[in-house]
Image (cartoon, helix red, strand yellow):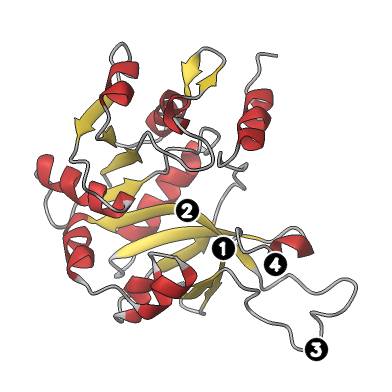
Amino acid sequence: MSFVVVIPARFSSTRLPGKPLADIHGKPMILWVAEQAQKSTALRVVVATDDTRIRDALASSNVEVCMTGSHHESGTERLAEVVESLELAADDIVVNVQGDEPLLPPALVDQVASLLANSTAPMATLATPLEHVEQLQDPNVVKVVGNAHGQALYFSRSAVPFDRDGTAAAAPDLSHCRRHIGIYAYRAGFIRHYLALPVSPLEQLEKLEQLRVLWHGESIALADACEVPLPGVDTPADLEAVRQQLAPR
């Protein structure tokens, strides 16, 4: 199995401007992410950006950078441009790693690529059991429900599945509740197909791109992550927590 990792990175961020270049012990965050991805068995790791500041920050590293257009509205659109630039074949596997995950275990990159390679689905992703009741009610924690065949049924910001008889209890049963991990593997040809699909009403309501795939009847392979990843970086508080995690011991 061979695959390519693409890390979409844009400079602007509402809650943390300039996030990819945030300093973490002398290195920009995007370099931490890329170096984690390089520890996987990926054939190639590419950072996709439209910002020369991100390109320049990586110039002295051994990380490949692909410059893209600035018109993209989503990371998936940026991913599609990279697929074309790299002239990937339709069956080639592409793993999309978020640019704000400097603590992402490399094993998860390999796992999601392997999951797709051994599936008939055009797309794959990972999840992990919820650890706290608060996560069930938090709209920033995306929940996912799967079926008995290792495929995603639905993604939601709401509490799913809803335990009618036990959710109000002091300690509701979380055994069937999964938190979605935002790492995806695609077959390159499906990325092109995805962008041709009309935006779905569920996607618009939940603000979750992956619902477009399910709405149009396509399948997403789903498995529990082999390691529980630490949180990514969305806020200044998250950034400080990551700095503490990565502080030299």
Amino acid type assigned to the residue bearing label 3 in the image: Asp
Dot 1 falls on a residue whose secondary structure is loop
Give how far across and how far down residue 218 sits, in percent.
30, 76
Which sits in the foreground, 139 or 242? Answer: 139
Residue 92, x across and y down, in percent: 19, 51
User: How far is disc 3 from disc 4 in space, using C-alphas?
Assistant: 15 Å
Please provide percent x and percent y for residue 44.
26, 33
- Disc assigned to residue 142: 1
Q: In the orientation shown, which residue stands out farthest toward the left?
A: 87
Residue marked by disc 2: 182
User: Could you say whether the residue bearing mark 2 is in a helix, strand or loop?
Assistant: strand
Label 4 crowd bin: few (<14), some (14–19), many (20+), radius 10 Å: many
Callout 3–callout 1 Cβ contact below 8 Å = no
User: What element does badge 4 sit on?
Assistant: helix
* Helix, strand or loop status at disc 3: loop
Crowding at dot 1, Cα within 10 Å, few <14 / some 14-19 / many 20+, comes out as many
Picture coordinates of residue 65, whole percent (x, y): 24, 28
Residue hosting label 3: 165
Q: Indicate the quadrant containing the C terminus: top left, top right, bottom left or bottom right.
A: top right
